[in-house]
Image (spheres, rainbow, N blue to C red):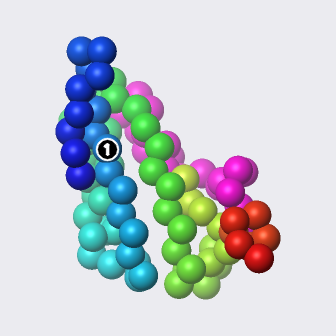
């Protein structure tokens, strides 16, 4: 995780690759919600692909933060994972 500055604005950059829906993923989600709560003027997207999720194993979940609220959305760009991303 990195905090960076561009054009006088701070932003958080975070990438995580893991084989399982681990504690690190849970902590990333918690951080995303917390940032939205304490800094409602901030916005961003968080994409998660969890192939262990029996219902959504073939799709990405998108979390959108805007105006202090986090909304879970269906992905329209990379889902379904098979065949769009992999064969």
Does residue 1 show up magenta in the picture?
A: no
Residue 34 in the figure: left or right of residue 83: left
**Where, by quadrant of the figure, is residue 27 drawn?**
bottom left
From the viewer's perspective, is residue 78 above or below residue 87? above
Does residue 78 show up magenta in the picture?
A: yes
Residue 45 in the figure: left or right of residue 80: left
From the viewer's perspective, is residue 17 above or below residue 52? above
Residue bounds of the magenta highlight: 63-80
**Where, by quadrant of the figure, is residue 39 drawn?**
top left
SS under mark 1: strand
**Where, by quadrant of the figure, is residue 12 drawn?**
top left
Residue at 23%, 26% (x, y): give it. 5
Percent position of residue 11, x then y: 28, 32
Judging depth in this view, the residue of 25 and 38 nearest the camera is: 25
Q: Which residue is mark 1?
A: 13
Residue at 42%, 82% (x, y): give it. 19
Percent position of residue 66, x then y: 44, 32
Residue 37, visible in the rendered structure: no
């Amino acid at each position: 995780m990195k905090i960076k500055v561009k054009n006088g604005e701070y932003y958080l950059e975070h990438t995580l690759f893991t084989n399982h829906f681990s504690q690190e993923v849970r902590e990333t989600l918690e951080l995303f919600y917390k940032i939205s709560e304490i800094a409602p003027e901030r916005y961003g997207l968080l994409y998660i692909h969890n192939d262990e999720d029996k219902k959504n194993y073939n799709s990405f979940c998108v979390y959108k933060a805007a105006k202090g609220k986090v909304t879970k959305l269906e992905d329209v760009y990379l889902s379904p994972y098979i065949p769009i991303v992999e064969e």
